[in-house]
Amino acid sequence: MSRLKARDTTRTALEAIRSHRMRSCLTMIGILIGIAAVTVTVGLGQGAQKQVRDSIDALGSNLLIVSPGSSTTSTGFRGGRGSATTLTISDATTLSSIQVAPDVSGVAAVSTTSGSLQAGSTTWTSPVYGTTPSYLTVRARTLSEGRFITDADLANSNSVIVLGPDTASELFSGRDPVGESVTISGSTFTVIGVLTASGSTSSTSEDDEVIMPQSTYATRIASGTNRSSVSTLYVQAASRAQLSAAYQEVNAALATNHAVTTATADFTITSQQSLVTAANSTNKTLTVMLAGIAAISLLVGGIGVMNIMLVSVTERTKEIGLRKSLGATPRAIRTQFLTEAGTLGLTGGALGLGLGLGLAGALPSMIDQPVTVSTSVALGSLVVSLAIGATAGVYPAARAARLTPIDALRTP
């Protein structure tokens, strides 16, 4: 036999693996653990990215988020972003002007605090928002019942509130909350509507909240000199293509209002895309770091395959010599050992992928964290395991191919 066919080579390799089942299983453990670890790690990273993306998408669409204060000052020191009180209702009014910001389709000014709510004998603590009627559209929220606050509520500072679905459930426990009364900070408010669940998966629930007219919030909830200041301005661009233009218009209008320059800006504008990019960048860094640690297991697994293949070459020296004396070429010998090593890697990878998928299915219920394993990750794991096995077999296969029939047959 001068040349082994590929099918015969594969059959011979599989038979060699089957004849040493225990040793083969132990050889594959390193690759199995490595592939399972990489699969779960990458799945956790992808799940976290999807969770963050969904949470940011729940804010609305084509959104710019304006916060008071600057993240950095002109001298490089951090300013009071988020804690300053530099944004006011008049800023929202300015940005709502089509002459000032023609690419802006909606502006929602939001003031926020935490309030203790009481309905009958039930008490509950929730975030309390004072805002404008445009909040419903800009934040892409809908109502499950009742109505939202109106311009008339805003103009007359009516004592009305809209509840998030979780808040309504906690306060009224299945009863229809519309028309009921809720006491907040000593003032009584009438529930006029309930929001639909947002579907947000962030740690801060978007469904546990109380919304009232901004003017009502300023007179009943806010105190001191903060009555005209707002916590956040949600600015919606008319379309995704107009987002950049809207950003420039908002920046210029607020700079004029506050008499500041870019270097001395006392506000920060953040787009949804920048939030997604920043969150994804952080998650990717963590995923790559953890996957790198898991890859060490693959390296150890590859070394294990090489070690076992070298042992196999030593044990089967006479067999190699006999086959060469019958006409087997060095290429055929090399191919057989490479096939054995590649099969060990691929089988270990397939078992590791199965273990990883099983863990990916079980982990979300254990750690409350989504794990998403994409098809590309699954296929990539198999390719990597095959490559590691084949690479680890290169040296043992070359060593076997170099053996001469006479020396091999004389080996004790």
Image: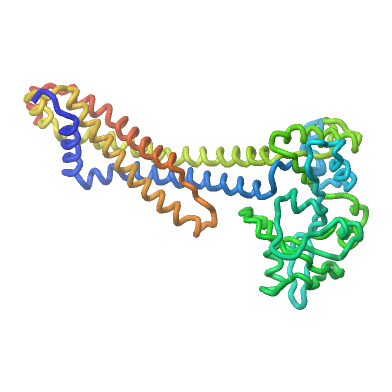
Q: Is residue 320 above or below residue 89?
A: above
Q: Nearer the viewer, residue 208 or 195?
A: 195
Residue 124 located left or right of residue 381 = right
Q: Is residue 323 visible?
A: yes
Q: Quadrant of the N terminus?
A: top left
Residue 256 located left or right of residue 272 = right
Q: Quadrant of residue 385?
A: top left
Q: Is residue 38 above or below residue 215?
A: above
The residue lying furthest to the bottom in this view is 121
User: Residue 157, percent across and down?
Assistant: 90, 61
State the colouring used for the structure image: rainbow
At a point 61% along the width and 54% down the height, the residue shown is 201
Q: How many marks?
A: 0
At a point 84% along the width and 35% down the height, the residue shown is 265
Q: Nearer the viewer, residue 221 or 139?
A: 139
Q: Quadrant of residue 412?
A: top left
At a point 79% along the width and 51% down the height, the residue shown is 134
Q: Quadrant of residue 244?
A: top right
User: Residue 159, percent across and down?
Assistant: 86, 65
User: Residue 343, percent across and down?
Assistant: 26, 38
Q: Nearer the viewer, residue 180 or 311?
A: 180
User: Residue 213, percent across and down?
Assistant: 84, 58
Q: Is residue 179 above or below residue 411?
A: below
Residue 201 located left or right of residue 360 = right
Q: Is residue 208 visible?
A: no
Residue 249 located left or right of residue 329 = right
At a point 81% along the width and 54% down the height, the residue shown is 133
